[in-house]
Image (tube, rainbow, N blue to C red):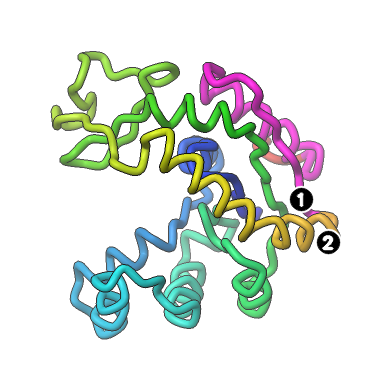
Amino acid sequence: MKLVFLGPPGSGKGTYASRIEERFGWPQISTGDLLREEVKKGSEIGREAEKYMKEGKLVPDEIVLKLLKERISREDCKNGFILDGFPRTLAQAEELEKITDIDVVINLVVPKEIIVTRLSARRVCRNCGAVYNLRTLKPKVDGICDKCGGELYQRKDDTPEVIEKRFEVYHEQTAPLIDFYRKKGILIDIECNDPDVPPEIMVDKIIEKLKEINPGLGK
């Protein structure tokens, strides 16, 4: 299946997508990761993208879509993939349609107060980037990453004031996008009204909905 995950910052997109990747083998694709990978490699497209990133500007859609088109053409995507955080705008969704069909769009519906509570408790490893939550996904040792032993820290944009602003911007940008996919009949709303619900419960909820669409899933 080809999936898109939509949801405000802190809604759990990356966490849920990575667990679904483990269950079904569909690669989780983040356009941000693709861009960083090209910059690290020093490729032509990476150097072009880096100019925008260094100036704090958004990388143009044509660059992102070129990378995405190449990524989903690889062998590991032949049975499906998960787009995490892309598209973000209606224009991106329309361009995405030109390079691939999408089967299901998972729209994570999470109230602002829960986002603030959840992101305020988020901690990230300085070394490997692993993400934890002091409420629902605690490290085994306080302040230390389970995976690599790196230091955990709170991102500057995970303060309540910044989170509220990011939440508002997200909804301004994606409201048309949600309508776009709902009209196509491929949008599924997944509601979360509890900041302490474990990721596994939410993943099971998403998989249950996917199996309603594709009863043979996972057999």
Query: Considering depth in this image, is 2 or 35 the residue closer to the camera?
Result: 35
In percent of width and height, residue 197 lies at: 56, 18
User: Image quadrant of residue 148?
Assistant: top left
Q: Which residues are magenta?
A: 186-215
Q: Is residue 180 visible?
A: yes
- Label 1 Cα neighbours within 10 Å, binned few <14 / some 14-19 / many ≥20: many
User: Image quadrant of residue 63?
Assistant: bottom left
- Report how far apart the C-alphas of labels 1 and 2 lie in the structure: 8 Å
Q: Secondary structure at mark 1?
A: strand
- Give the numbered dot on residue 2: none
For the point 67% across and 46% down, the residue is 106
Query: Considering depth in this image, is 127 or 115 the residue closer to the camera?
Result: 115
Q: Judge left or right: residue 136 versus residue 213.
A: left
- Extreme residue toward the front, this view: 161
In percent of width and height, residue 174 lies at: 65, 57
Residue identified by numbered label 1: 187
Disc 1 + disc 2, Cβ < 8 Å: yes
Residue type indicated by callout 2:
Lys
Q: Judge left or right: residue 77 versus residue 215.
A: left
Indicate yes or no whether the magenta region holds residue 189.
yes
For the point 48% across and 24% down, the residue is 117
Q: Judge left or right: residue 157 versus residue 177.
A: left
User: Image quadrant of residue 24?
Assistant: top right
Residue type indicated by callout 1:
Leu
Residue identified by numbered label 2: 184
In percent of width and height, residue 216 lies at: 75, 40
